[in-house]
Amino acid sequence: MIGALAVTVLFMGMMVLLAWPLGGFIARVIEEPEKITFLKPLAWLEESCSAVIGTAYKSEMNWKEYFFALLAFHTCGAVLLFLMLRFQSLLGFLDPRAINFSGYAAFNTAISFVTNTNWQSYVPELHMSWPVQMLGLTTQNFLSASVGVTLLCALSRAFRRAETNKIGNFWQDLVRFTVYVLLPLSCLTSILLLASGVPQSTQGAISYTTLEGSEATIPVGMCASQIAIKQLGTNGGGFFNANSAHPLENPTIWSHLVELIAILLIPMALCRTFGELVRSPRQGVFFLSVMSLLFIGAVFLSCYAEGQDLPGLVGGDHSLFQAEGNMEGKECRFGPFWSVFWAVSTTATSNGSVNASITSFLPLSGGVSLLLMEIGEVVFGGIGTGMTTAVVFLLIAVFAAGLMVGRTPEYLGKKIEAREMKPVALLAIFPAAIVLCLTSVALLHSAGIQALSNRSPHGMSEALYAFSSAAANNGSSFAGLSSEAAIYNVLTGLAMYFGRLLPAALTLALAGVLVEKKHVAQTAGTLATDTLAFGIWFGFVVLIIGALNFLPVFTLGPIIDHMTLFFPG
């Protein structure tokens, strides 16, 4: 355990060294890309997008205009991807394996990729042609990630500006982050993955002769480019069904390291970006420090759980346990630690890619991954959306602290009053309501029960994990759930759609309220929000809200599952 903790701390230290300068660069890209000399070769891409969008690219927007631009963009993307999937067979001349998706599956998949979730209720290498993988899914991997950053940009401006109703331009924020940040980083990551042995080909499959003399095929395609952006954009949808456990998606320890860095890089960098955009760098240090400590704690707890002895196993069978811990469902090439580290990384960052079977984790470690999603993925979270969620929780912490000391709460020079707390409270409640309501609907229906592979507390965890993953726009699966069933295609599609758009609307509404307020001068009585004491209070508030929302249903899943396993009878 000490070794695992040391490796985690060293890895996170390396990530801070990479992410901190990137965060400052992203802030400059959002505010003044024309002043960054080495970006000028890419300026023509922004100019081309500006010409296509027209005058709407330049004009500032209020929060309603910003949201309707976001809504229109998401809607058009979902419709286009839905049509591509429904009529995929028309691309048979490029990939003969192309078959049309059913209406339910096309709906679920289109919503999934447009909302940055990448929940996959299909087998990619069997059901998805490589042209759609490249043109439909990879394109949405870029765009859906950038939409999350636009929310952070709008909220940051709301704190920095005063007595106006303008929070920026959606199209400008979207294009700049895509062109100047995601595109170059994805090209670099693709090259590193190619060098590690990940394929990139226009062939639909490679034929070969087995040792027994029979003919077989291996599906391939534009794999490296999709994997690069799936990790950088916290998308997570695999080119292959086994995702990052597949030997072509993640062939070596070097590809494993590259992908782990890509998963954490931008979410960590955006902590500094927020601090720079609100002109308070100490806030960036505060968020990065608190999130890193929570992340390290989650890895430590999960590693401890996976290394436990199991006296309650039937017949005392410990065959699945080796010196390094529980090996069931793990990535055998790298061991339980890196499987656990990957699971924590992807559920903390809304990435959702997997390199192990989470259903094979012990209840406590599986519960940690579940909890990381249910607290809004505050620990780094999805690109942009993680930081906005963290700011929302911080506003709750500021408001509660202000009430306890009898002082009007303030944050970054803005008073936090009843009007601001209404969208904040809804942001804390709505995601939980979506998860709990849809989980209940699924388990009240016979088709929802039949899709579970376990009719035990572990089965409850399967269903709860599915809707938590969908509503949090994560996309990872607990496994064991037949998610291709129509009921889960529809319900998880609704969870992804409302889990993305309701928080987006409330975040922009909050920005609209804040940007109209005056700045107030900081005094000796102003609550400091970048200290160790406030960091502890902030972490406490995050965990308490998560417990209030989900502890009752947790007792029906991971907690009873844990008690049954360790204390049978």
Image (cartoon, helix red, strand yellow):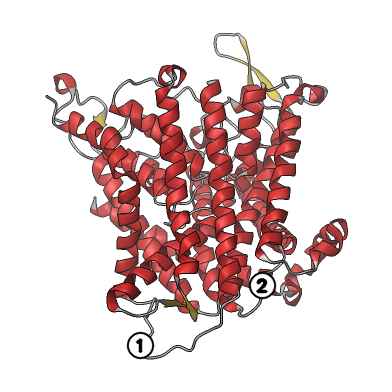
Q: Which residue corresponds to mark 1?
A: 525
Q: Residue at x 42, y 45 (%)?
A: 432
**SS for dot 1:** loop
Q: Position of residue 79 (x, y in %)?
A: 73, 37
Left or right of 175 on screen, residue 195: left
Q: Position of residue 538 (x, y in %)?
A: 34, 66
Above-or-below relation of 469 to 395: above
Image quarter in which the C terminus is found: top left
Above-or-below relation of 20 to 206: below
Q: Quadrant of residue 294?
A: bottom left
Q: Position of residue 101 (x, y in %)?
A: 68, 23
Mark 2 vs 1, N-terminal side: 2
Q: Amino acid at mark 1?
A: Gly
Mark 2 touches mark 1? (CB < 8 Å): no
Q: Amino acid at mark 2?
A: Asn
Q: Which residue corresponds to mark 2?
A: 165
Q: Residue at x 36, y 91 (%)?
A: 524
- The residue sitting at the front extreme is 418
| Viewer-side residue, 30 vs 549 | 549
As measured in the structure, the alpha-carbon distance from the residue carrying label 2 to the one carrying label 1 is 29 Å
| Viewer-side residue, 268 vs 102 | 102
**SS for dot 2:** loop
